[in-house]
Image (cartoon, grey):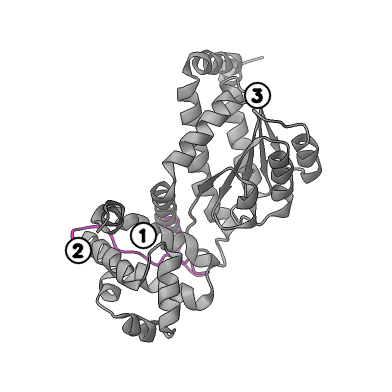
Amino acid sequence: MPRDLKETFSGAAAPALAAKVRTLAPSMTRSVQRVAEAVASDPAGCAALTVTGLAERTGTSEATVVRTARLLGYPGYRDLRLALAGLAAQQQSGRAPVLTTDIAVDDPLADVVAKLAHDERQTLADTAAGLDIAQLAAVVDAVAAARRTDVYGIGASGLVAQDLVQKLLRIGLVAHAHGDPHLAVTNAVQLRAGDVAVAVTHSGSTGDVIEPLRVAFERGATTVAVTGRPGGAVAQYADHVLTTSTARESELRPAAMSSRTGQLLVVDCLFVGVAQRTYETAAPALAASYEALAHRHRTGRP
């Protein structure tokens, strides 16, 4: 077996498989999603099944099972079974199983807190497991050297865009957050090679974010998509894609809430990487910003 396949099917890579299932499931067809959810919730049981057995268990077809395996990045169902066996072995050695944490309207508040905390931890773990470090490093290099960085986001993703921009400003870099789609396009027209444009969109299909990224791409800027749907429309205009995960959605916790956790982790990783690359200038700039704002955090200030 080739070295890369051995690594894919090793126990160490098993958490990444579970993360990929949770990330991609919302964008799958319902029949494929049933298979994906089955392998994520019961890897040991599914690893013991033939392709026919898993199709019968999920009420789908053998073709659907094979298609699910390929969507998850495996050549065929036999290869997926090997990965599931590795995940099952990890769970038997003490790792926590996948939990169902949907929030019901009559849940006690203490249960709501516990379920949200679990989902937040899982989203962070899934995002970290699925984050392409080579892509992240390339984005860090681009932002560290950029003349300016523009960040686009709408709604909850707009808050993440603002978070990234204020971090970059604190270390002396030129950055702008654009929540207004008209201003975003107007500013994107001014970008050129050596600039960076970042689009934050969980769905990967937000038109008001894709349009300015397209303009920036056509102007020669380095373009980045921070998205939970790496196969979404935004990716066609992105030189680099940073994939986020999301907790399971429910009626009381839509994607706008759950996606933000993964996005903020990616933003923090990006910022710290840039601060490391630009440390000689970033450290004095950060100290200066602290000093300039210190009096605003003291009691009794005029």
Between circles 3 and 2, the one closer to the viewer is 3
Taking the image as shown, residue 86 lies to the left or right of residue 302, namely: left
- Assign a secondary structure to mark 3: loop
Could you tell me the amino acid type at mark 1? Leu
Q: Label 2 is placed on what type of residue?
A: Gln
Q: Residues within 10 Å of mark 2 (few under 14, many from 20)?
A: few
Counting residues from the start of the chain, the first of labels 3 and 2 encountered is 2
Q: For the N terminus, which image quadrant? A: bottom left
Kind of residue at badge 3: Arg
Q: Which residues are magenta?
A: 92-113
Are circles 3 and 1 on residues that touch, CB within 8 Å? no
Q: Label 3 vs label 2: CA separation? A: 51 Å
Query: Dot 1 surroundings within 10 Å: few (below 14), some, or many (20 or more)?
Result: many
Choose between 161 and 74: the one closer to the eye: 74
Q: Earlier in the sequence, mark 2 or mark 1?
A: 1
x%, y% of residue 255?
Answer: 57, 58
State whether residue 300 appears in this view. Answer: no
Tell me where residue 165 appears, x and y as whole percent. Answer: 62, 32
**Residue 250 position (above or below residue 219):** below
Based on the displayed image, in which of its 4 quarters is residue 151 positioned? top right
- Quarter of the image that includes the C terminus: top right
Residue 114 is situated, as x and y percent measured from the top left of the image, at 40, 57
The disc placed on residue 147 is: 3
Q: Which residue is mark 2?
A: 92
Q: Which residue is mark 1?
A: 17
